[in-house]
Amino acid sequence: MLKRFPGLIIRPKCKRRRLLVTSLIMCILFLAIRQHPRYPLIVLANRDEYFDRPSTSMDWWQDHKDILAGRDQQSGGTWLGVNRAGRFCAVTNLRTVPVSKARTSRGELVSRFLRGDDPTTSSYSSALSRYRDTYNPFNLVFGDASSIHLHSTLFSESRRLEDGFHSVSNGSPDEPWPKMSRGLSELESAIKTSDVLDPSMFIEIMRDTRKPPEKLLPDTGIGDERERQLSSIFVAGEHYGTRSTSLLKFSDQRIDALELTYTPGQRTTECREFQINLLTGMQQTG
């Protein structure tokens, strides 16, 4: 199913000047693990990137037909995705300067897990420890509705995430930023106070452009102005900003996937929705 949200201004694209800052992918990720009786795993994610970097929206891949994900057309990988077997994976970068263009795209980490190159989560985790230095610094979340794991360049090995609410962004997972704490609080409130999990309440969390007081901004080496710009859950910018919001809800029998894509300045939105039957691996709607 493909639809457009009403009341949004559509403007033509134009060539935009690239700002000289560290490359960034997917700004923030929230997870609710076994916090709802019908959905053992709920994932919310915003992807932040330059608007002139070519990519495609969430869809079934032609060369790997079991993968449902967006795709980075520059490097071929993805920032977040699922497959018909119920696997899930997402990556964020760490704001470490400098980065090396000679290293393999971090999007390949997600593609590898979704392709099933490593047959089990355990074997994938072991492989990560061996080849992770071929990638620029990253945080990686992977698994399925039964168990979710976190691997980071900052860790010596993968960690299994406990039941509860979690957030991962572009810093150390052990050092939550204000936008991470705010989003976690709002996600917990939404799940625990609502009988019906309407997608709109999750999208509202992810479109939050509020910024914390300056004294609470993290210091990741990119300068005060850039820290301020990136301090909200949703980054509204003309050259760089939030390009998509993803919502994944895992039940025992299916995955509900929704992706919204944005043009510069949060002006235009496209929505794609999919359902994967985990009993048959078949797509129910799309």
Image (tube, rainbow, N blue to C red):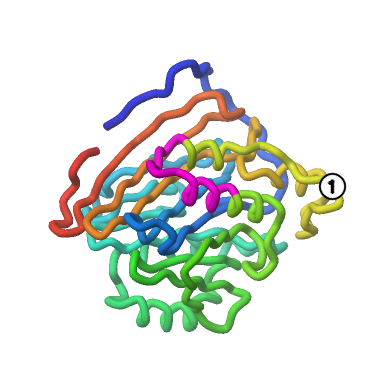
Image point (56%, 36%), residue name? 51
Q: Is residue 144 left or right of residue 150?
A: left
Q: Is residue 10 visible?
A: no
Residue 264 pos. (x, y %): 58, 29
Residue 43 pos. (x, y %): 44, 54
Q: Is residue 264 above or below residue 283?
A: above
Q: Residues within 10 Å of mark 1 (few under 14, many from 20)?
A: few
Q: Give the magenta-colored segment's residue range.
A: 186-200
Residue under numbered circle 1: 214
Residue 55 pos. (x, y %): 44, 42
Image point (50%, 25%), residue name? 268
Magenta stretch contains residue 162: no
Magenta stretch contains residue 192: yes
Identify which amino acid the numbered label 1 is placed on: Glu
Element assignment for label 1: helix
SS assignment for the magenta stretch, majority:
helix
Give the residue at the far left of this rendering: 280
The quadrant of the rendering that contains the N terminus is top left
Q: Is residue 165 visible?
A: yes
Viewer-side residue, 102 vs 206: 206
Image point (34%, 46%), residue name? 257
Give the residue at the far right of this rendering: 215
